[in-house]
Image (cartoon, rainbow, N blue to C red):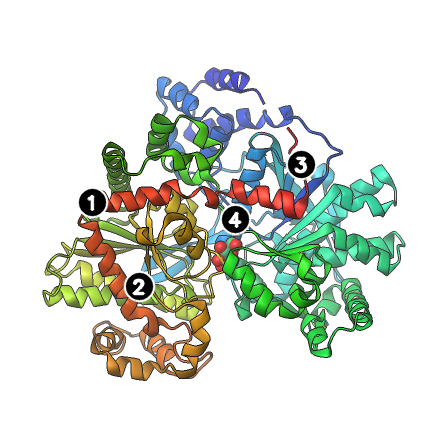
Amino acid sequence: MNRESLSEKLRAISVAGKSAQELYTEISEACMSECGCAVRKLSERRAYYFSIEYLMGRMFYNNLMALGVLNEARKIFAEKGFDLNRFEDVEDAALGNGGLGRLAACYLDSATALGYPLCGFGIRYRYGLFRQRFENGRQIEEADDWLKTWGDPWSVRRADEAIGVTFADMVVTAVPYDMPIFGKTVNTLRLFQAEGSPEAEKISEYLYPADDTEEGKLLRIRQEYFFSAAAVGQLVQRYVRKNGRQFERFPDFHVFQLNDTHAVFAVAEFLRLLTNVYGLTFARAVGIAQRTFRYTNHTILPEALESWDMRLVERILPEIAQVLKGLHLYSKRKWERGGCPADEMRQMAVIRGKYFSMANVAVYISEKVNGVAAIHTKILEEQLFGAAYRQMPEKFLNVTNGVTPRRWLMLCNEELSAFYDKRLGYGWRTDLRALRGLNCDDADDLAAFAEIKRQKKAQLAAYILSREGVALLPDAVYVAQVKRLHEYKRQLMTAFAILYLYFDLKEGKLPDFTPTVFIFGAKAAGGYRRAKAVIKFINDIACLVNGDEEVNTRLQVVFVQNYDVSYAEKIIPGTDVSLQVSTAGFEASGTGNMKFMMNGAVTLGTMDGANIEIVEASGGRNNYIFGARVGEIEEIKKYYDPHEAVARNLKLKRVVDTLTDGTFQDEGGELKEIYSSLFEQTYNSPDHYLVLYDLPKYAEALLRANADYRDQTVFAQKQLLNATRSAFFSSDRAIEEYAKKIWKIEKLL
Ligand code: 26Q
């Protein structure tokens, strides 16, 4: 790539008489003309990332930065009288739900920045994750027409490389759209669009908005097979054209990384091609697949583990069903010969009763299986995949997640980045470990950092005012919980904790309380009633608190609408305290926690997922930890009774009773349903996520942080220690681990 030639092109763009939209397209096209200039060695070993979601966010600023022309472009266009900030309302590419999809985007960014050959495969949804607004405190979903206003100048349609995908009832054309990922090299994210008939087009029409459970099963299976088969078909075809049928060498050039089980049909399709089309024996095909595939698990929630009804698979993918049956028998025979105990064989079986287990296929066929945080991997080894771990311990390893410091620090926090440049030079920009060189005891540095935090908070307040019409208290502690809405993430527990503070303030019990703003952002899957009820409850609390003149100069609650990647880029740098309060053992890793840390927020949370490693890296004194630990939960569950908990603790009872005592209107009955979930034996055990168990300690932790905040210098130091100890949570580190331990690929340059 050539920075000078690109600047030249940008300078040559005239703004006269052009709409912002026309300029957006022209600038993007100038950047796109750089794609071809990257050095490409086609014969290299490459890794391919199979993910049904990519939560890319806005590409414009990111790409200009990656091409090294962002600041220059700002200047060039300012001189022409055009403000590049105008593009801040370009729609996000939200082709993902949350953690898993955003991780895929961070990994493409890091691999490319480091020079590793990694290409992504996925689906080009016509509509991404729904847009959210509130009406009377309730969530309303709208279709995300992400191409509507600004189009998609960052993708190139490659009709010449379209490929057919065969279902029992139709053949669908998969048309690739290639999106370049810029960095030290250029990689490609290839998203397939389904075409051919109205029925076919439905396959890539919209992203499933549940980030955990299966709904509309048939279309979901079609989506999964559609992109998996298109990707595998293409790569195998290309390989055969070059190398003929010598498949033994296929794994020397390809490694297929499964981002959770959503692309496990790629395994079956690969076996199908090698056996049914190219005539290899089943045993040889399995052997080759076992050197090609890798699998990352992202969740242990039982409702999120994919298992499909075999009859359904037989109906729409008969050949694939045959392959899966073949794999079931093949693996069973192998284990039998190895003397594997019967109950372990059952646990690992590809087909279990009427269903086939996507995870068991992935584990059996993959050379490496990894979890996404140390504790998560331990749970996989000891519980979820216990039998497989005992049989094949060498497959398992941990790679703790990471986030890209380019979007999540350099782009969203230019002020903090400039501060680092001044104190440390530019080295930290390519190796975040250099941040450790900053002396966090220096009074000037602490003051400078505190001033940056103040600025980012002011910017956030202005933004929230413009978007939500709410004016945040200026000199308050900003506390944020932003993530998908899920019972296990316990936004409900935060709601109760706020009520604790509210009642204490009303009673004059907290004389030294520093004003505090709670910021929420979360989308609830449309069909997830309980989650939607929690949104309504928090909005009710916001009304109560913000409307109460006795407290509203000291306590404030805002639930922002349509939280997305671009909103995150504003909220995260402007936050003092990051809430990460999942029930221990349920959050595989979390990645928002890392983004907050990188921007100098302290973590207030439970010992779950990567929180444990965050606290280890930045020090126990610089974070606020509370609540039941993973090792304790099983024991607690034996005796825990939520009725008893509220009977023994009147404060606890008081906040919980607001659900039913008329404090809030409940025409729809959803608050009553929340109440039932805490006390009644229904779907899960009462208070399955231990909200009332951990709540008193949560409120205490919030008050500890609030008290510490009074000494602003000491608090700024805790924050700066977090920011400067965050290198481990860079996705550059994570990608180096994948490249060396899992993919065994080399940098291109
Ligand atoms: C399952 C069956 C049918 C349809 C959909 C699904 C489904 C869809 C999405 C299951 C799971 C997901 C998404 C999971 C996810 O986002 N997991 C998160 O991954 C992050 C990156 O590793 C972690 O940081 C989070 O802790 C984890 O929750």
Task: Name the residue beneath numbered marker 3.
Answer: 746
Frontmost residue, 721 versus 217:
721
**Image location of residue 163, percent across then percent down:** 74, 46
Calculate the distance from the C-alpha at mark 2 to the C-alpha at mark 1.
24 Å
Q: Residues within 10 Å of mark 1 (few under 14, many from 20)?
A: few
Q: Earlier in the sequence, mark 3 or mark 2?
A: 2
Of the residues tagged 4 and 3, which is closer to the observer? Answer: 3
The residue wearing badge 1 is 712
Q: Is residue 119 visible?
A: yes
> For the residues marked 1 and 3, what is the alpha-carbon distance in whole angstroms?
46 Å
Residue behind mark 4: 103
Looking at marks 2 and 4 on the same chain, the residue that comes earlier in the sequence is marked by 4
Horizontal relation, residue 251 to residue 679: left or right:
right
SS class, disc 3? loop
**Viewer-nearest of discs 2 and 1:** 1
Query: Residue type at mark 4?
Result: Leu
Please state which of residues 445 and 298 is positioned toward the viewer in this rendering. 445
Report crowding for label 2: few under 14, some 14 to 19, many 20 or more residues within 10 A (C-alpha).
many
The secondary element bearing badge 1 is classed as helix
Q: Position of residue 413 (x, y in %)?
A: 36, 36
**How far from the left and from the top, in percent, is residue 371?**
57, 57
| Residue drawn at 43 percent across, 72 percent down | 632
Q: From mark 2 to mark 4, how far is it between C-alphas?
A: 25 Å
As helix, strand or loop, the secondary structure at mark 4 comes to helix
Amino acid found under the numbered disc labelled 1: Gln
Q: Which residue in the protein does label 2 denote?
A: 494
| Above or below: residue 248 compared with residue 311 | above
Where is residue 67? Give x, y as percent: 51, 27
Give the quarter of the figure containing the C terminus: top right
Check disc 3 and give the amino acid type: Glu
| Disc 4: residue Cβ within 8 A of ligand 1's nearest atom | yes
The image quadrant where one finds the N terminus is top right
